[in-house]
């Protein structure tokens, strides 16, 4: 079993910014959640364990547990007197009146209490600051693009908040790649604050972002911050093909439904188990180590329900995969080629350059 010396204090910057964070960010979607969440005392243990090991990057959202996640974090930060050492991120965008993330709230609500318009951004930020008990957010995320607000308005509003000191940086989550590219371009041309990161689903069984989002991140200097790097627990190896699903996040109602239990994903998991055995590691450690080493990845978002589970995930920091193991995992999990992939093929490039092989800047 090959190990390295990386730990939570092997800090890195978030893209081409000066914000310094741990390689794993502690996600707190489970804090205060009634069905699959953790009790307050367990949440505090997770919080303390992460900070005690040098972690400094904590992620939440205004919608998590109807605001309870932010309230708990605010209390922990205040009681531990650790606000200045923590890089605190939260999000805006979802309307809690109709969100399935808030139990019992399915009514129609105020349309201006969601989305990326200026009115909602100010409303949401004021609420988050109050619940978190702080006067600024280090990294403020647009949780999801609403599909209607112009990127110019989003940039203007978030840039104003940076200048006011209410937020230090901002990023985009779950948005089209072209929107991130447009925002970065406008910000650079107009000398405005721009997004420093994108938060998107990314794992061995979710590599779609490599077509457009990763190239945008590399070109603009935005970090990729993967969420669900274990695919809702599928890549932890806890599920068995054909077995009845009675426990875990992917059993019962969940955001993924049964989409992770595909034939191709089971094949990826089988290889993951082989590599984990070779490494004398858990499936989760290998899957997280693979994700952490991907191009453009700044920090990987991890969650846990108990300190032992958190530690098992953090153990991935000392996992070093061989070139052969990475190549096998890459091949097994590769997405089917799309239109843009064909345009970048070696054959097309040879046609463009008169039969010559030409390697672009930064290409392997």
Image (cartoon, helix red, strand yellow):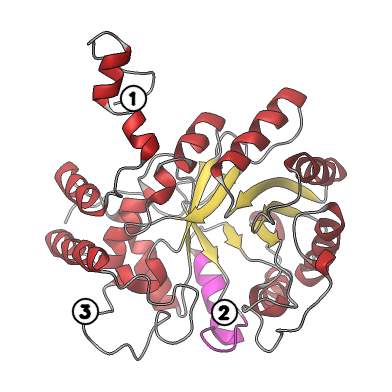
Q: Is residue 37 left or right of residue 105?
A: left
Q: Secondary structure at mark 2?
A: helix
Residue located 53% across and 78% down the image: 45
Q: Please state the horizontal and vertical placement of residue 14, each as a whole percent of the image.
A: 56, 42
- Given residues 122 and 76, the one toward you in this image is 122
| Magenta portion: prevailing SS class | helix
Q: Is residue 49 magenta?
A: yes
Mark 1 vs 2: CB contact within 8 A: no
**Mark 1 vs mark 2, CA separation in Å:** 43 Å
Q: Which residue is mark 2?
A: 43
Give neighbour class at mark 1: few <14, some 14-19, many 20+ (Cα, 10 Å): few
Q: CA distance from mark 2 to mark 3?
A: 32 Å
- Name the secondary structure under disc 1: loop
In the displayed structure, 300 sits above or below 36; it is: above
The quarter of the rendered structure image containing the N terminus is: bottom left
Q: Is residue 45 above or below residue 165?
A: below
Residue 28: image location, x then y, percent: 57, 71
On residue 241, the disc is 3
Q: Nearer the viewer, mark 3 or mark 1?
A: 3
User: How many residues crowd around disc 2 within 10 Å: few (fewer than 14), some, or many (20 or more)?
Assistant: many
Residue 101 image-quadrant placement = bottom right
Image disc number at residue 363: 1
Image: magenta residue range: 32-51
Q: Name the one closer to the observer, 133 or 300.
A: 300
């Amino acid at each position: 079993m090959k190990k390295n010396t990386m730990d939570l204090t092997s800090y890195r910057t978030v893209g081409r910014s000066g914000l310094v964070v741990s390689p794993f960010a502690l996600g707190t979607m489970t804090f205060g959640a009634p069905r699959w969440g953790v009790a307050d005392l367990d949440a505090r243990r997770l919080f303390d364990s992460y900070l005690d090991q040098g972690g400094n990057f904590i992620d939440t959202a205004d919608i998590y547990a109807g605001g309870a996640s932010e309230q708990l974090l605010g209390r922990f930060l205040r009681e531990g007197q650790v606000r200045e050492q923590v890089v605190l991120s939260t999000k805006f965008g979802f309307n809690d009146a109709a969100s399935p993330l808030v139990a019992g709230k399915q009514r129609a609500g105020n349309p201006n209490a969601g989305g990326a318009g200026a009115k909602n951004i100010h409303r949401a930020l004021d609420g988050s600051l109050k619940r978190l008990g702080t006067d600024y957010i280090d990294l403020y995320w647009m949780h999801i693009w609403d599909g209607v607000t112009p990127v110019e308005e989003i940039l203007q509003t978030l840039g104003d908040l940076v200048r006011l000191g209410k937020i230090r940086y901002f990023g985009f989550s779950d948005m089209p790649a072209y929107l991130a590219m447009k925002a970065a371009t406008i910000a650079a041309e107009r000398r405005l604050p721009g997004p420093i990161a994108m938060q998107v689903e990314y794992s061995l069984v979710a590599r779609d972002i490599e077509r457009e989002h990763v190239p945008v991140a590399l070109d603009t200097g935005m970090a990729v911050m993967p969420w669900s790097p274990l695919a809702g627990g599928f890549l932890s190896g806890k599920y068995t093909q054909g077995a009845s699903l009675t426990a875990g996040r992917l059993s019962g109602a969940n955001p993924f439904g049964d989409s992770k239990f595909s034939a191709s994903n089971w094949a990826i998991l089988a290889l993951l188990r082989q590599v984990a055995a070779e490494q004398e590691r858990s499936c989760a450690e290998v899957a997280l180590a693979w994700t952490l080493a991907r191009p453009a990845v700044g920090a990987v978002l991890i969650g846990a329900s108990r300190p032992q589970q958190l530690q098992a995930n953090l153990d991935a920091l000392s996992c070093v995969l061989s070139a052969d193991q990475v190549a096998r995992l890459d091949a097994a999990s590769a997405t089917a080629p799309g239109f843009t992939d064909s345009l970048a093929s070696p054959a097309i490039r040879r046609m463009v350059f008169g039969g010559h092989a030409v390697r672009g800047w930064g290409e392997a």
